């Protein structure tokens, strides 16, 4: 894959990862498990992208976090809060609108 294509794919995925995290974190999970589940679903993201994103989403008030120290190794769990849920609903609706439009464009049914 050439650099131009790679750059455009990266740009397309950037917002998708935000939406995927907000939806996936409706059930609390820690960073590595989130990373693995997204990758299993085909939403490829690396740790160097995911962890800063989680911190940004928390700073923006879209997810909450808490430390679980019950196990030998403490883990930080994240969960989408009400504000994040509202944003996920808006982003999902827009995603569906764009998906419908692209489907019409690629199938020749532009109108």
Image (spheres, grey):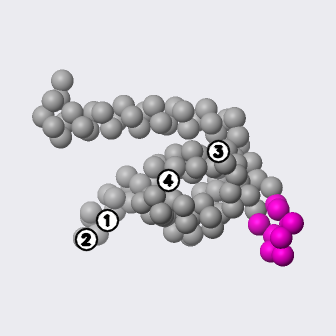
* Marks 4 and 2, the one that precedes in the sequence: 2
Label 2 vs label 1: CA separation? Answer: 6 Å
Q: What residue is drawn where x is 34% and y is 62%?
A: 7
Q: What residue is drawn where x is 56% and y is 64%?
A: 35
At which x and y percent is residue 61? 71, 43
Q: Is residue 31 magenta?
A: no
Instruction: Sort mark 1 into few (<14), some (14-19) or many (20+) by Cα contacts within 10 Å.
Output: few
Q: Is residue 76 visible?
A: yes
User: Which residue is tagged 2?
Assistant: 1
* Marks 2 and 1, the one that precedes in the sequence: 2
User: Which residue is tagged 4?
Assistant: 17
Residue furthest to the right in view is 70
* Marks 4 and 1, the one that precedes in the sequence: 1
CB-based contact (under 8 Å), mark 4 and mark 2: no
Instruction: Sort mark 3 into few (<14), some (14-19) or many (20+) by Cα contacts within 10 Å.
Output: some
Which numbered mark, 3 or 2, is in the foreground of this view? 3
Q: Is residue 73 magenta?
A: yes
At which x and y percent is residue 78? 71, 54
Disc assigned to residue 6: 1
CB-based contact (under 8 Å), mark 2 and mark 1: yes
């Amino acid at each position: 894959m050439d650099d131009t294509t790679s750059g455009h794919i990266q740009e397309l995925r950037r917002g998708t990862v935000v939406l995927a995290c907000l939806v996936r974190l409706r059930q609390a999970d820690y960073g590595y498990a989130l990373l693995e589940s997204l990758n299993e679903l085909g939403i490829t993201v690396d740790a160097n992208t995911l962890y800063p994103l989680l911190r940004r989403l928390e700073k923006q008030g879209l997810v909450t976090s808490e430390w679980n120290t019950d196990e030998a190794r403490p883990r930080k769990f994240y969960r989408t809060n009400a504000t994040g849920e509202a944003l996920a609903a808006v982003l999902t609706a827009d995603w569906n609108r764009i998906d419908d439009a692209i489907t019409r464009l690629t199938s020749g049914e532009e109108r």
